Image: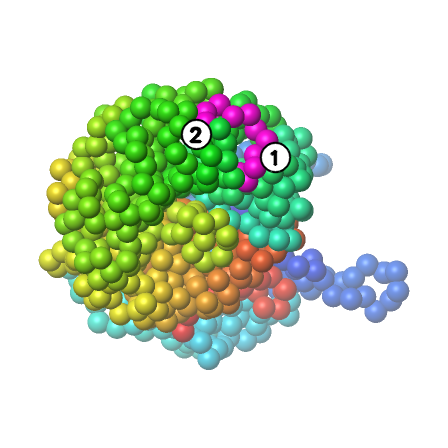
Amino acid sequence: MTGEPGFIENRGQWNPAALYRLETTGDQGAQLSVWLDRGGFVYDASALGASAVEDVAPTTTRHSVAVEFVGAAAASVSAQSQLPGTYNWLGTGATSAPAHAWRRVAYRGVYTGIDARFDVVGGGTLETTFEVAPGADPDRIGLRYTGASDLQLDADGNLVITTTAGDIVESRPLAWQVNADGQHLPIAAAFELRGTEIRFALGTLDPTLPLVIDPVVTFSRHIGGSSSEYVASVHEDASGRYITGWSGSSDYPATAGVVQPGNAGGANDFFAAKFNLANDTLLWATYVGTTATEYLGRSVLAADGSLYVAGSVLSGSVGLIQGTGGSYDLEVFHLAANGQSLLASARLGGSASDYLGDMRFGTGGDLVLTGQTGSDLVSWGSPTGYDTAPSGTDAFVLRLNAALTAMTDFTYFGGSSSSEGALGVAVDAGNNVYITGSTFSTDSPLNTLFGTGGGSDQFVAKFDAGLNNLIYALRFGGSGSELTTSLTYTGGLLGTAGANPLVVDTLGRAWVVASTASPNFPVSGGAYQTSQPGSYSAFIAVVNTAGTALDASTLLGGDSTDLGRAIQLSGSRVVVTGGTASSNFPTTAGAVQTINGGNYDFFLSVLSTDLTTLHYSTLWGGDSTDIGSALIADGPRMLIAGDTFSPIPAVPTGALPFGPGGSYDTGLVEITPTPAAPVPALGPLGLGLFMLILTGFGLRVARRRPT
């Protein structure tokens, strides 16, 4: 039997009128079962009350409310998205067959041109959606409630169903449309209570536009100890979800049997954790480090599920495989897929400080690392490459074999300025290497396309596979400063090099997300946002294949500081995340959160690849500082990982953190603006009803919408 809640099918164990049952358990013994039948559904609520007699079991209060589709036709009912495991019923006279559970039950043809759908999201939250085809009449939709003690609309437009066992609250409806450019067009929507019936009051619809389904927050978690954790990478494969970073906590919630259940003795260690994809349970978590102090914890996930975790170490104790070693060195660990052993480790670096910015796999399975170095060539072991004459502090790129026994290629990169640093690296199908970061140099090898020397500018450079030839190096910016993030490992807002700011598409174009303080940052024609209204705005830029021009660029931000930190391509759209302090960061209809709740909130934005259209944008966060650092964009589903100083926001599961929680913890949130399972293109209207807000039961609020 699976631990993930779902609609359990009736295989003879219940009254034949019931088709499926969803069961949710809350605090203090509270319970709500939702029974689906052919004509609607039934809420079956129960709550424990105190007994009047000592040592006598408490009484149970039960109350059922039937909800009927008013005037509906005989719908075709089917279950979708089966969950693992089976349910069996044992006992005298038990004759039912093993039953399965499902994430979705669809009702086709409830009314002419109108379907209904029930989904289980998060840890048991019920979502009900109506889908209205072009030409169909949404005024036909009606829900009749029988058996409630009272029905009321509260001040926020939510339906409060009063029972003797507690209140059931159905959150107010939300509706919108999407035009041909993918823009979200909100439709005014509200409940109308007519006696014991609910109808929907809707604004003007455009019958030519396609259906949009309300976004679903499928889970949210944070994990950490009593001090600070910073996330650097997030991955998924068929067996689970992985996050890595670094921790200053002595009580990070490591699990039994892992390679390192406690801090090794330094101020910080790397951490790695793996979660179950199906129900978000923690499979394992471990420290990875030495008696020295580690920072960053960037990782790549191998096909066998093992992780390479890397960063910088202060006075490290891992054996050197390259260079003389200095104050900060590069450090790489190869962690087994079960988290229970180290397969290899390596340290490399010169006589000064060497900081890791990013790491990726090469096409042959080797590792490509980039960052910033102040070490001279001799102390690096005199490797050969494109640039062997550093100028102060330069960016670097190197290749390391998969066994972590040898550095195979190395080059510096920089101009005459004493400060360059790379925080992003990508590798294309030809094994060419791209890096991005910030530079104060204005001379060769940088080709200045834009930039007026107002501080640091953004650069993108491309090398051949052996790092012997520079294919191009482009510098761009405005009269202010452009930055990816600081390379000093001091923690805090700009001090954590925990971003994924670079990706390369199949054409060989480099996509960059970062931030700019320039009022004249170069944007392309028709860009979604052309002005820089705050202190820093996020920007997205696309460098052409030759490295001679920007194919597209746009700003993205509001009236304060907006930090662009991670970027992914997903089909014909580009997805970015970061952190915003703005009070008016752009959001769209269907956003999970539209108002910044604290100092900084995560942002998640989806744009067209020509950067002219904002398809979807939302905030996520609590009442303090929350900044997105890494993401996965897999079709409609998007996962953000980042750093949070806030109490976890309200989520469908009412999820609690793993570990005691400290100043900064690792935050995870998954958002699906469109349904993960395909649905027919039925028309212009989607009504999302978010249920199971059980105020009288002690269950946490399923989801709060901004008003």
| Residue at the outermost right position | 54
First-in-chain label (1 vs 2) = 1
Above or below 411: residue 694: below
Task: Give the percent coordinates (x, y) of residue 262.
Answer: 67, 39
Name the residue that disc number 1 marks: 290
| Quadrant for the N terminus in the image | top right
Q: In the rendered structure, which amino acid carries the disc numbered 2?
A: Ser
Task: Give the percent coordinates (x, y) of residue 603.
Answer: 37, 58
| Residue at the outermost left position | 525
Q: In the rendered structure, which amino acid carries the disc numbered 1?
A: Thr
Image point (48%, 43%), residue name: 296
Above or below 628: residue 332: above
- The residues tagged by marks 1 and 2 sit, at their Cα atoms, a distance apart of 23 Å
Q: Is residue 43 left or right of residue 134?
A: right
Q: Nearer the viewer, residue 611 or 298?
A: 298
Residue 379, label in figure = 2
Image point (26%, 73%), residue name: 203
| Quadrant for the C terminus in the image | bottom left
Name the dominant secondary structure of the magenta segment.
strand
Q: Is residue 512 left or right of residue 159?
A: left
